[in-house]
Amino acid sequence: MIEWKLQVQRHGELASLVCIGNRGNQFIGQLKVAANGWNRLLGWNARGSALGVLLTPCRSIHTFAMNIDIDLIWLNKRNEIVHVETSVKPSSWRYRADAQSVIELPAGVLAKHGFKNVAEGGSEPKIQNQAGIQVDMPAENPETEQQS
């Protein structure tokens, strides 16, 4: 079982991301906050030198103009993890009705820090949100996944 605690602290146009796992894994990175029309339009390309991008508010993303896979962390209004997806392919579309924002990271970042999807041979993923509640994270959710 993998347990993470997630913290997102916004600092204007940047945010700090801290994920602490039950094995002592710790990940700290900068995210570009895409909260206005221009940065949201640019999406992944708005990140500049930051590791990833925090799209807020956001319930859906697409990877149509991308040529790399990405990892996604979907968050609710309290910045608690509601869903995690790894290695989302280009030309994909994702939607989460229960999300308020999403973090896009380069594919492999989550695996590097101990997260594995069940389909990749991991145990059933569990995420511990800020309130300390464990949330089951299904490897695939056909209701939220549509590819063209």
Image (cartoon, helix red, strand yellow):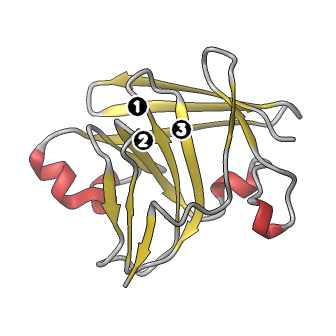
Residue to which mark 1 is pinned: 15
Secondary-structure class at tag 3: strand
Residue type at mark 1 is Ala
Which numbered disc flags the more N-terminal residue, 3 or 2? 2
Query: What's the distance in space between the residues labelled 3 and 2, CA to CA?
Result: 19 Å
Query: What's the distance in space between the residues labelled 1 and 2, CA to CA?
Result: 5 Å
Task: Note whether 148 is above or below 142 in the view shown.
Answer: below
> Which label sits on residue 82?
3
Give the percent coordinates (x, y) of residue 74.
47, 43
Crowd around label 3: few <14 · some 14–19 · many ≥20 (10 Å) = many
Task: Note whether 91 is above or below 123 in the view shown.
Answer: below
Who is closer to the viewer here, 127 or 15?
A: 127
For this view, does 100 lie left or right of residue 125? left
Give the percent coordinates (x, y) of residue 24.
85, 31
For this view, does 112 lie left or right of residue 95? right
Which numbered disc flags the more N-terminal residue, 3 or 1? 1
Who is closer to the viewer here, 73 or 146?
A: 146
Residue type at mark 3 is Val
Residue type at mark 2 is Leu
Who is closer to the viewer here, 101 or 113?
A: 101
Give the percent coordinates (x, y) of residue 22.
85, 30
Decide: marks 1, 2 in contact (CB < 8 A)?
yes
